[in-house]
Image (cartoon, grey):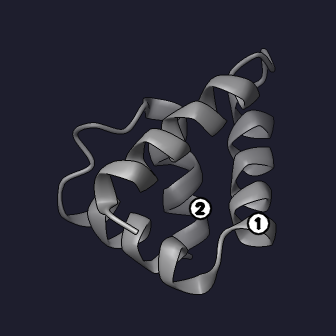
Amino acid sequence: MHIEQLIKMANDISNFFDADPDKQIAAEGMKNHLSRNWERRMRQAIIKYCQEDGSELSSLAKAAITKLAV
């Protein structure tokens, strides 16, 4: 899967979780979603992108992916 598709998917997911007023809970929810529903290669690719650039990711997506990387 191309990184552009992963970025779009991550931003779409972050839009859903962004409805939660508590952004820490939203980031944790998104992280859990990515952990459960994305295959390992997808997670590794988006983590690498977030660490190297991340400019096209929403702030919530960046927070969730940073948590995912730990």
- The residue shown at (27%, 49%) is 54
Q: Quadrant of the C terminus?
A: bottom right
- Point out residue 36 in the picture as x, y percentages from the top left corner: 81, 69
The reply to whether discs 2 and 1 touch (Cβ–Cβ < 8 Å) is no
Q: Is residue 55 left or right of residue 4?
A: left
**Helix or strand or loop: what does disc 1 sit on?**
helix
Q: Which residue of the protein is positioned furthest toward the front in this rendering?
A: 1
Q: Give the side of residue 1 with respect to residue 25, left or right.
A: left
Q: Locate residue 23, reporting x and y percent.
A: 69, 28
Specify the amino acid type for callout 1.
Asn
Say above or below: 65 vs 24.
below
43 vs 2, left or right, is: right
The kind of secondary structure element at disc 2 is: helix
Mark 1 nearby-residue class (10 Å; few <14, some 14–19, many ≥20) = few
Task: Give the quarter of the figure containing the N terminus.
Answer: bottom left
x and y percentages locating residue 67 in the rendered image: 59, 62
Q: Is residue 15 left or right of residue 24?
A: left
Mark identifier at residue 67? 2
Residue that protrudes farthest toward the bottom in the picture: 40
**Disc 2 to disc 1, C-alpha distance:** 16 Å
Q: Residue at x 73, y 70 (%)?
A: 35
The residue carrying mark 1 is 37
Q: Is residue 65 above or below residue 40?
A: above
Q: Residues within 10 Å of mark 2 (few under 14, many from 20)?
A: some
